[in-house]
Image: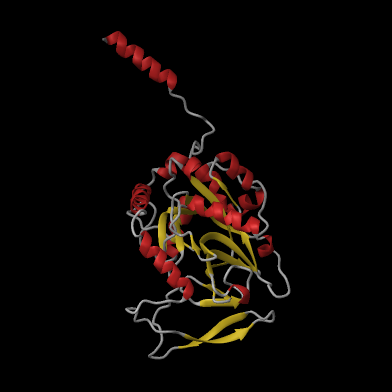
């Protein structure tokens, strides 16, 4: 019996190997991962979200359609807001002032509809195989709704920040009988698309993220005119750069500066569906944090920006405190929601 156990132990030792280049082998990786209960809680909540994604499909589809077509249930007691429109030099409509009366909505139905991220304090073991990294430019996060012949961008609070004609299905006079909804970041007349909720009246929000990205890529390939400004369509749409979360692909993506000012990196679990609010299945890191946390090298531009900051852990802790979060890394934490 002893000889058999010795033989089995020897075989297990010979068969167990660790790839020194695997993601997460950076010397600070284990230290960061195990610093607090926050990581454990994030991993637990991540699994809980995955478990409940199967529920409520029909209700989500109805809500999405109502959101785009401005249809409301008879039980909805919210009233309509009235806005005064002003126009940019290029003809787009910008909502500047709004009047509030007893017949107006106390809360926009477009408020808090975005899928939001958390600081990536727990590095999932499946990161390399089941996650996607997306580059997020500096700009205004918004929900873009193309319906009834006009395209409207709403901020996180549900306020209209811009109205214009676009080439999105539903976003111009020729397509007023359909609708599309996109999650974007707006900067300098370009809407960088992070996610797709619906397109040409087909709904995608309840599909897994990797499926949504497949369709989003297909739509942009079919409609190259979306990224080309014209006299009548001065605002363009471009898909935000993304890659699989393998060490090789992330390194390649971060080896050169982006064409825009990079704010941070979003990390989407490939199974996450689109639902309003903060999700542990969507992570967020600043570019200079990648070498420390994920062992992913970045180009010199992003290294320089990181030199003025302390460690990632201290930065996140101070960020949360500065924005009024009473908990911190190391405590029983509710992490900061990134826009």
| Quarter-of-image position of residue 262 | bottom right
Observer-nearest of 328 and 334: 334
Identify the residue shown where x is 71% and y is 68%. Answer: 229
Q: Residue at x 34, y 50 (%)?
A: 51
Q: Residue furthest left?
A: 1
Q: Quadrant of the N terminus?
A: top left
Q: Is residue 309 visible?
A: no
Q: Does residue 127 appear to the left or right of 190 in the view shown?
A: left
Percent position (x, y) of residue 286?
A: 54, 54
Q: Position of residue 252 (x, y in %)?
A: 63, 43
Number of labelled discs? 0
Q: Is residue 53 left or right of residue 143?
A: left
Q: Give the farthest residue toward the bottom.
A: 101
From the viewer's side, name the closer residue of 286 and 220. Answer: 220
- Point out residue 254 in the picture as x, y percentages from the top left corner: 62, 48
Residue at point 30%, 14% (across, down): 5
Question: What is the x, y in percent for residue 303?
Answer: 61, 50
* Quadrant position of residue 334: bottom left
Please state which of residues 46 and 275 is positioned toward the viewer in this rendering.
275
Coloration mode: secondary structure
Above or below for 46 versus 233: above
* Residue 212 visible somewhere in the drawing: yes
């Amino acid at each position: 019996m002893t000889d058999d156990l010795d033989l089995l132990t020897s075989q297990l030792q010979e068969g167990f190997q660790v790839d020194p280049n695997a993601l997460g082998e950076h010397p600070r990786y284990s230290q960061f991962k195990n610093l607090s209960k926050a990581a454990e809680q994030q991993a637990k909540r991540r699994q809980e979200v995955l478990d409940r994604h199967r529920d409520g499909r029909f209700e989500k589809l109805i809500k999405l359609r109502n959101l785009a077509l401005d249809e409301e249930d008879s039980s909805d007691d919210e009233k309509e807001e009235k806005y005064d429109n002003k126009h940019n030099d290029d003809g787009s409509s910008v909502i500047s002032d709004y009047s509030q009366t007893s017949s107006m909505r106390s809360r926009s139905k477009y408020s808090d509809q975005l899928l939001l991220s958390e600081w990536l304090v727990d590095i999932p073991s499946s990161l390399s195989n089941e996650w996607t990294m997306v580059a997020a430019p500096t700009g205004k996060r918004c929900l873009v709704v193309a319906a009834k012949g006009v395209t409207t961008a709403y901020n996180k609070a549900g306020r209209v920040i811009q109205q214009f004609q676009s080439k999105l299905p539903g976003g111009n006079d020729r397509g007023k009988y359909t609708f599309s909804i996109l999650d974007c970041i707006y900067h300098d007349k370009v809407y960088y698309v992070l996610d797709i909720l619906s397109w040409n009246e087909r709904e995608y929000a309840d599909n897994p993220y990797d499926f949504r990205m497949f369709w989003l890529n297909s739509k942009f390939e079919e409609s190259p005119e979306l990224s080309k400004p014209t006299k009548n369509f001065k605002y363009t749409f471009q898909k935000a750069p993304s890659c699989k979360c393998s060490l090789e692909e992330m390194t390649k993506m971060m080896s050169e500066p982006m064409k825009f000012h990079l704010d941070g990196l979003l990390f989407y679990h490939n199974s996450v569906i689109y639902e309003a609010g903060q999700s542990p299945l969507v992570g967020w890191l600043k570019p200079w944090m990648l070498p420390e946390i994920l062992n992913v090298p970045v180009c010199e531009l992003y290294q320089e920006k990181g030199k003025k900051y302390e460690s990632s852990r201290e930065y996140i802790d101070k960020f949360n405190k500065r924005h009024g979060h009473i908990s911190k890394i190391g405590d029983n934490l509710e992490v900061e929601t990134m826009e």
